[in-house]
């Protein structure tokens, strides 16, 4: 996997207590990496990080804020990472309406803190900056956005991530042009699903809550179209991109989309119904939509990742939803070792990934 590049490597991972961060911490650890996680405490109860005792599976876990520059600098410089995966963020659209200042501070200034400190750490060769598909100026067009299209965003979360992309490009051109400088790429993914996510105002976690409470599933925007992908899909893209940068391939220090195939772009109502189908219980009803703006149509064009990295999505939306629901069914059964179950899902994905068998990158 990934040319064994992560074996013995020091990896600094921000946001390791979150949903995607927990999955990435486990995967990196299984690849032989020495992981130092830096993040706020888990903000959901339960949380995947606590339930699977991920702290015990990595080299070091630091509870800290990326806005705390001095503490962040101390931890990065002491750990001396080979590569940084930056996932820490305020990741929720709806929360950004309530906390716009926090959203911008965390996503823009926090990212700049991690970038600036990492770029001055002499051992750090690579930096994967994770943003979102919502960084694009969304014109509700019926095709996927390409990496060279304008950044934007209606809500404060989306626009903050557009700012991160612009800032990252500026940082690269201003400070990362020397031959021996750190290589930095940005990675944009769609609606990521998977077990272990309990965030508010996310479709599948909300569906699971309604089902377990014996209530009908209420959805706000049933016809909204999104690209749905299993969490391991974009993470594999981040890891493959990290491999390229660690191998010194400067041409990959750029922005990349990691999304599903077009047949995995589904309406919200269809996804909720699939959750009920695989859970074998639950009923979907449409709740009156509130006044907060949410995009109706958003897709990614992934030709660049396919052609230059050799990365292609592996699971269909149906498979991704089923893997996700299976995780929650096993978790709530209370008699399953969820660390073992989660690692089995990672191993299953590794065995099935299509790009590993014919990847253009060797």
Image: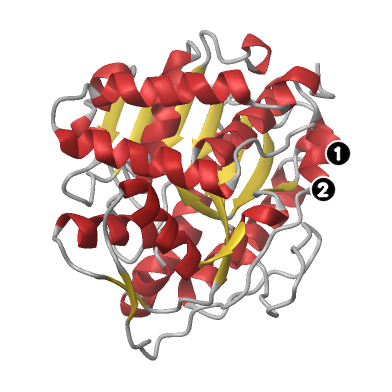
Q: Can you say which quadrant of the picture contains the N terminus? A: top right
**292 to the left or right of 65:** right
Quarter-wise, where is residue 30 in the image?
Answer: top left
Q: Is 105 located above or below residue 316 in the figure? A: below
Residue 25 in picture, x, y percent from top left: 40, 28
**124 to the left or right of 255:** left
**287 to the left or right of 153:** left
Q: Residue at x 57, y 21 (%)?
A: 350
Q: Is 22 located above or below residue 100 in the figure? A: above
Q: Can you say which quadrant of the picture contains the C terminus? A: top right
Q: Nearer the viewer, residue 110 or 116?
A: 110
What separation in Å lies between label 2 and label 1 (alpha carbons)? Answer: 6 Å
Q: Residue at x 75, y 70 (%)?
A: 150
Q: Secondary structure at mark 1?
A: helix
Asked whether disc 2 touches disc 1, contact meaning CB atoms under 8 Å apart, the reply is yes
Q: Nearer the viewer, residue 299 or 161?
A: 299
Residue 251 in picture, x, y percent from top left: 84, 36
Q: Can residue 216 be seen by looking at this rendering?
A: yes
Residue 23 in picture, x, y percent from top left: 41, 33
């Amino acid at each position: 996997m990934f040319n064994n590049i992560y074996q013995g490597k020091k990896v600094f991972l921000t946001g390791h207590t979150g949903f995607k961060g927990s999955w990435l911490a486990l995967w990196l650890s299984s690849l032989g990496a020495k992981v130092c996680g830096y993040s706020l405490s888990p903000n959901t109860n339960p949380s995947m990080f606590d339930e699977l005792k991920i702290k015990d599976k990595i080299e070091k876990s630091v509870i800290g804020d990326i806005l705390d520059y001095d503490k962040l600098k101390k931890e990065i410089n002491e750990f001396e990472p080979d590569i940084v995966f930056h996932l820490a963020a305020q990741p929720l659209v709806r929360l950004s309406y309530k906390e716009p200042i926090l959203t911008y501070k965390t996503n823009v200034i926090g990212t700049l803190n991690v970038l600036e400190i990492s770029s001055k750490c002499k051992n750090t060769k690579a930096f994967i900056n994770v943003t979102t598909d919502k960084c694009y100026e969304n014109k509700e067009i019926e095709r996927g956005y390409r990496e060279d299209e304008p950044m934007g965003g209606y809500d404060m979360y989306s626009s903050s991530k557009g700012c991160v992309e612009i800032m990252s490009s500026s940082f690269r051109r201003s400070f990362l042009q020397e031959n021996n400088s750190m290589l930095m790429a940005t990675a944009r993914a769609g609606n990521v699903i998977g077990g272990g996510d309990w965030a508010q105002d996310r479709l599948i976690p909300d569906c699971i809550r309604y089902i377990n409470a014996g209530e009908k599933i209420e959805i706000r925007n049933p016809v909204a179209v999104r690209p749905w992908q299993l969490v391991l899909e974009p993470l594999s893209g981040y890891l493959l991109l990290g491999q390229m940068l660690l191998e010194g391939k400067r041409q990959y220090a750029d922005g990349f989309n990691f999304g599903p195939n077009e047949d995995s772009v589904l309406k919200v109502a269809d996804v909720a119904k699939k959750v009920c189908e695989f859970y074998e219980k639950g009923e979907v009803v449409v709740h009156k939509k509130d006044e907060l703006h949410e995009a109706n149509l958003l897709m990614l064009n992934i030709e660049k990742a396919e052609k230059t990295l050799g990365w292609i999505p592996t699971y269909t939306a149906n498979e991704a939803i089923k893997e996700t629901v299976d995780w929650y069914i096993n978790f709530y059964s209370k008699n399953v070792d969820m660390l073992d179950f989660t690692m089995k899902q990672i191993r299953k994905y590794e065995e099935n990934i299509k790009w590993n068998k014919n990847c253009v990158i060797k």
